[in-house]
Image (cartoon, rainbow, N blue to C red):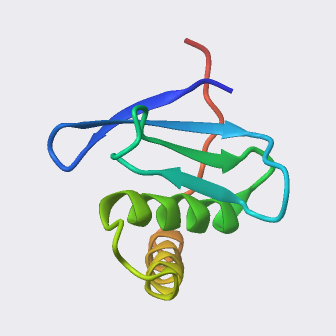
Amino acid sequence: MADHHFTLNGDERWLIRFCNLKGQAYGYTFSQKSKRPRILIHAGLRGRHKLTIIVHELLHALYPTASEEHTEQAGKDIAKVLYSLGYREVADGPN
């Protein structure tokens, strides 16, 4: 899958990559203190679960001092609202 680059907090350059992750985690966030700030998301995720994990990891990136419990609940809540509003992943069309 292609890498996706984006900016957070005004000027921090981040990378998001969908890849096969080993172990039990569905995502990892390597903070802005890293030489290469990045978020890794397990490529096998689909639907609302994928949205929840993406939001969860973005919250880690934006609020690195927030507790895991807070990030977990906020990610679920935000994804639930977005999903109920109709946000869905769509397949890329032809270029």
Q: Where is the N terminus found, in terms of image quarters?
A: top right
Let me know if residue 86 appears in the view.
no
Q: Residue furthest right?
A: 23
Say above or below: 90 vs 93. below
**Percent from the top left, x then y, of residue 83?**
53, 70
Say above or below: 4 vs 18. above
Number of numbered discs present? 0
Q: Residue at x 49, y 75 (%)?
A: 75
Quarter of the figure with residue 63: bottom left
Q: Residue at x 36, y 66 (%)?
A: 64
Q: Residue furthest left?
A: 10
Q: Residue furthest top?
A: 95
Instruction: Decide if residue 26 is on the left or right side of residue 38.
Output: right
Let me know if residue 76 appears in the view.
yes
Instruction: Looking at the picture, tell me which residue is in the foreground, 42 or 78.
Output: 42
Instruction: Decide if residue 84 is on the left or right side of residue 43.
Output: left
Q: Where is the C terminus found, in terms of image quarters?
A: top right
Q: Residue at x 43, y 82 (%)?
A: 67
Instruction: Looking at the picture, tell me which residue is in the foreground, 71 or 30.
Output: 30
Q: Residue at x 60, y 55 (%)?
A: 28
**Percent from the top left, x then y, of residue 18?**
66, 39
**Percent from the top left, x then y, of residue 26?**
72, 60
Instruction: Looking at the picture, tell me which residue is in the foreground, 54 or 35.
Output: 35
Instruction: Decide if residue 56 is on the left or right side of residue 65.
Output: right
**Percent from the top left, x then y, of residue 59?**
40, 66
